[in-house]
């Protein structure tokens, strides 16, 4: 965990894995990307600066970034060629525990077509969803899905991008299932 009481930061000792990065607030939104890059507390990358701005525009004073797969890589194509099941289990556990502890009720999906960078990423997202669906969360995206049907990545989106409802059950059962079969 980060020392500053406003930062949320859960990583491994080597900092090659990041499960959580965010800033505490009274009203928090969780965002799910594909994989963590270089961002750290007090040193956000461009993607997380966009996440913070868009969250603030939508009325949130706190945000937390999770990822479908927690391995740090600047490019999702640099992720493990085979999924590490232990990493996935720990990622799911940290995600579920922090959502419960922080009282988060809204998840913003924000990864674009990067979900197709590795064969196992759709499986990871489906697994996350299976563990999260009992929380009765509101699932959101910004803008229309990509041409391939995935939630848009926030990097090049306007600060004034309103959250819109997203049918996560349909997405998981139709779009993500198509990719993995």
Image: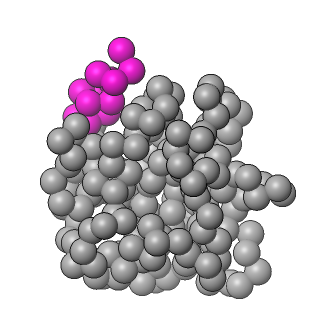
How far across and how far down the image is residue 87, in percent? 68, 39
Vertical order, 126 against 27 (above or below): above
Q: Residue at x 27, y 78 (%)?
A: 159
Q: Which residues are magenta?
A: 170-181
| Frontmost residue, 74 versus 31 | 74
Q: Is residue 7 left or right of residue 60?
A: right
Q: Residue 137: in sight, yes or no? A: no
Q: Residue at x 66, y 56 (%)?
A: 18
How far across and how far down the image is residue 83, in percent? 62, 29
- Picture quadrant where residue 24 is located: bottom right
How far across and how far down the image is residue 110, in percent? 36, 56
Vertical order, 109 against 162 (above or below): above
Colouring rule applied to residues: one colour
Q: Residue at x 15, y 54 (%)?
A: 144
Residue furthest toward the right?
13
How far across and how far down the image is residue 12, in percent? 78, 55
Q: Residue at x 39, y 21 (%)?
A: 180
């Amino acid at each position: 965990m980060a020392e500053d009481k406003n930062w949320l930061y859960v990583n491994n000792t080597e900092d090659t894995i990041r499960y959580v990065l965010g800033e505490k607030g009274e009203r928090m939104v969780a965002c799910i990307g594909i994989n963590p890059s270089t961002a750290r507390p007090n040193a956000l990358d461009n993607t997380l600066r966009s996440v913070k701005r868009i969250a603030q525009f939508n009325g949130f004073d706190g945000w937390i970034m999770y990822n479908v797969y927690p391995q740090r890589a600047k490019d999702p194509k640099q992720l493990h060629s085979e999924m590490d099941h232990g990493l996935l289990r720990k990622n799911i556990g940290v995600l579920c525990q922090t959502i419960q502890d922080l009282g988060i009720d809204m998840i913003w999906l924000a990864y674009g077509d990067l979900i197709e960078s590795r064969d196992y990423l759709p499986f990871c997202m489906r697994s996350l969803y299976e563990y999260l669906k009992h929380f009765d969360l509101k699932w959101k995206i910004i803008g229309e899905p990509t041409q391939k049907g995935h939630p848009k990545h926030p990097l090049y989106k306007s600060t004034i991008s309103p959250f819109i409802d997203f049918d996560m059950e349909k997405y998981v059962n139709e779009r993500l299932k198509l990719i993995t079969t």
